[in-house]
Image (tube, rainbow, N blue to C red):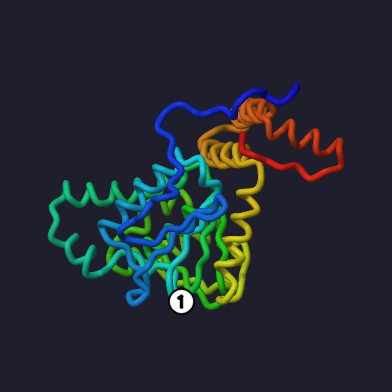
Amino acid sequence: MPYLTGERHQLPGNRSELADYQPQHFLFALEQGVATITLNRPERKNPLTFDSYAELRDLFRALAYADGVKAVVVTGAGENFCSGGDVHDIIGPLTRLDMPGLLAFTRMTGDLVKAMRACPQPIVAAIDGICAGAGAILALASDIRYGTARSKTAFLFTRVGLAGCDMGACALLPRVIGQGRAAELLYTGRSMNGEEAERWGFFNRLCSPESVLAEARAFAAALAAGPTFAHGMTKKMLQQEWNMGVDEAIEAEAQAQAICMATNDFHRAYHAFVAKEKPQFEGD
């Protein structure tokens, strides 16, 4: 089959490049298809607030329509990733909310994780220092995690009298590190150092504190230069197949792969192989 001819196909609907996006509660930069989200309250170890939760949720939802964003990096300013929900801006006010208000909050925080898992771009977390509570969930909801030996990751919820089942932790964490290890962390709220996190499979790689962000960006850039339509399909299948039997998963993958075989990127790869050249993927 030859390449599709004519102008590059423009998807219908409200598409966005996000090149001019200016958030209010964190930093955002877009360079060569890689968006970097930086939690930017270093004096407090980058805690989340009601507003930053909501703005992050809305941004990850918008990424589904952002053709110019091919991969995402999430990090924290200073020497920490994220200390979780702000004690003064979130925890205190929560003690004064009624049950409908509390449920609205917990659903909003869960919606952030849903948005991260639903956005088609791979998400790479660059983690140094404190990665705790909701910050640990942001790391967990990412697709790839680069950390440092000095980092401390903790699912702190039981330390404040709450259950470990927050923002999808009981579904996501066992799939990353195993049921027994996840149970220990979620029951105790203890922290993992970077070496343990890598050994248990929570971190994909350990880096030096000085290089962790650069290495995460380099990995994201390599993904952004690849077959991004196919990457989005891989992410979708990784998410959907959690709830499938093996036969269903094999059929779903047959359909997904057939769709990818109809893309120009698949044909570019074949023609580049024949010509003994490196394929130049364009995500279509």
The mark tally for this picture is 1
Could you tell me if residue 118 is visible in this image? no
Compare residues 45 and 35 and report the one nearer the observer: 35
Compare residues 135 and 172 and report the one nearer the observer: 135
Residue at 59% in and 67% down: 214
Could you tell me if residue 96 is visible in this image? yes
Q: Position of residue 251 (x, y in %)?
A: 63, 26
Q: Is residue 153 left or right of residue 281?
A: left
Task: Classify 10 Å Cα crowding around label 1: few (below 14), some (14-19), many (20 and above).
Answer: some
Residue at 20% in and 52% down: 102
On the image, numbered disc 1 is attached to which residue? 79
> Residue 239, relative to residue 199: is it above or below?
above
* Quarter occupied by the N terminus: top right
- Farthest front residue? 7
Q: Position of residue 121 (x, y in %)?
A: 53, 45
> Residue 260, relative to residue 100: is it above or below?
above
Q: Position of residue 274 (x, y in %)?
A: 86, 35
Residue at 63% in and 26% down: 259
In terms of secondary structure, where does tag 1 sit? Answer: loop
Compare residues 141 and 216 and report the one nearer the observer: 216
Q: Is residue 108 left or right of residue 116?
A: left
> Residue 204, relative to residue 16: is it above or below?
below
Compare residues 73 and 166 and report the one nearer the observer: 73
Kind of residue indicated by mark 1: Glu
Specify the quadrant of the image occupied by residue 93: bottom left
Residue at 75% in and 42% down: 279
Q: Is residue 135 left or right of residue 242?
A: left
* Quarter occupied by the C terminus: top right
Q: Position of residue 194 (x, y in %)?
A: 55, 72
